[in-house]
Image: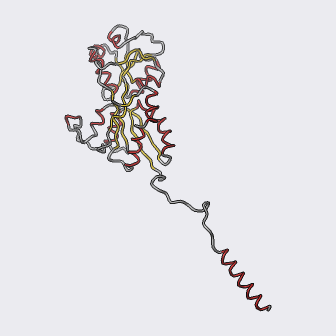
Amino acid sequence: MKKTIAILLAAFLLLAFSACGRTTPSAETETPEMTDDTEPVTLYVFAAASMTETLDQIIELYKTAAPNVTIVPTYDSSGTLKTQIQEGAVCDIFISAAQKQMNQLDASKDAEGGNEEGLDFVLQGTRTDLLENKVVLAVPDDNAADIQSFADLGTEKLTLLCIGNEDVPVGAYSEEILTSLGILDQLEAANKLTYGSNVKEVTTQVKEGTVDAGIIYATDAFSAELTVVDEATSDLCRQVIYPAAVLNITQNEQAARDFLAFLQSDEAMAVFTSVGFAPAP
């Protein structure tokens, strides 16, 4: 009898030790495999300087919609950004403040369409007209020169006007306005023009009161809380359209397409329209 009990006890202990050697997986110890939806992605977005405040807000919103995606924006004049892309900068999405700079990167545009260099950077099928902006005449808070309209720029009221360089979209629009008014040559001859390398530089000069007025976008005037005294009509300059596209050099095409789609969503458009942008017609 004692021998039988000893055998049974030994068998029980053997089973117990065997059970202790096994572990049961739990939710706390398992590491889930990464899926395409959770894999971290970094997107580089080159955007016109006039989009700085709004795009920064939208990037924050996108962190909720796609927490695995990090958006790294670069803001500057569209011409400078186009050159950086052409010279090999890493960029997934380009948003220009004019069709010209996008055309220069779009292989579907021939020389007559604006692609004189035969560049091929736009991912075909992704280009879209994203936003519309307005060109306005803004003045410092005190408006010491009493500038009230574009017409005043051709009078003795004006001592110094700031506009963008000719290779900057806002500068090209400004030259159109001054040419339409017949005063561009007059202002240049009288040394009444000073220039900014992008719209933010023009805005800063107006804000600081170093010039009598500046020609900028309505959205920049809103963000800088500047006084707007006039808005360019269609007889003074062409429509201001911001095209956007995924570039064919992207390493994250689907993520780039998704973010571009988000920029066109009601949520993103609410941010754009809050400062004066409008959906492109």
Q: Residue furthest front?
A: 1
In percent of width and height, residue 139 lies at 43, 16
Q: What residue sits 49% from the left and 57% below the top?
A: 34
Of residues 121 and 245, which is closer to you in this image?
245
Q: How many marks?
A: 0
Q: Quadrant of the C terminus?
A: top left
Figure check: 144 above or below 217: above
Of residues 166 and 172, which is closer to you in this image?
172
The quarter of the picture where residue 6 lies is bottom right
In percent of width and height, residue 127 lies at 32, 40
Q: Residue furthest right?
A: 2
Is residue 13 left or right of 95 when viewed as pictured?
right
Q: Residue furthest top?
A: 156
In percent of width and height, residue 118 lies at 23, 41
Q: Quadrant of the N terminus?
A: bottom right
Residue 91 in sight = no
How are the colours assigned in the image?
secondary structure
The quarter of the picture where residue 148 lies is top left
In percent of width and height, residue 242 lies at 35, 32
Is residue 258 left or right of 25 when viewed as pictured?
left
The quarter of the picture where residue 162 lies is top left
Of residues 120 and 131, which is closer to you in this image?
131
Q: What residue sits 38% from the left and 25% below the top?
A: 196
Is residue 43 left or right of 188 when viewed as pictured?
right
Of residues 173 and 62, which is closer to you in this image?
62
Residue 155 in sight = yes
Is residue 190 left or right of 8 when viewed as pictured?
left
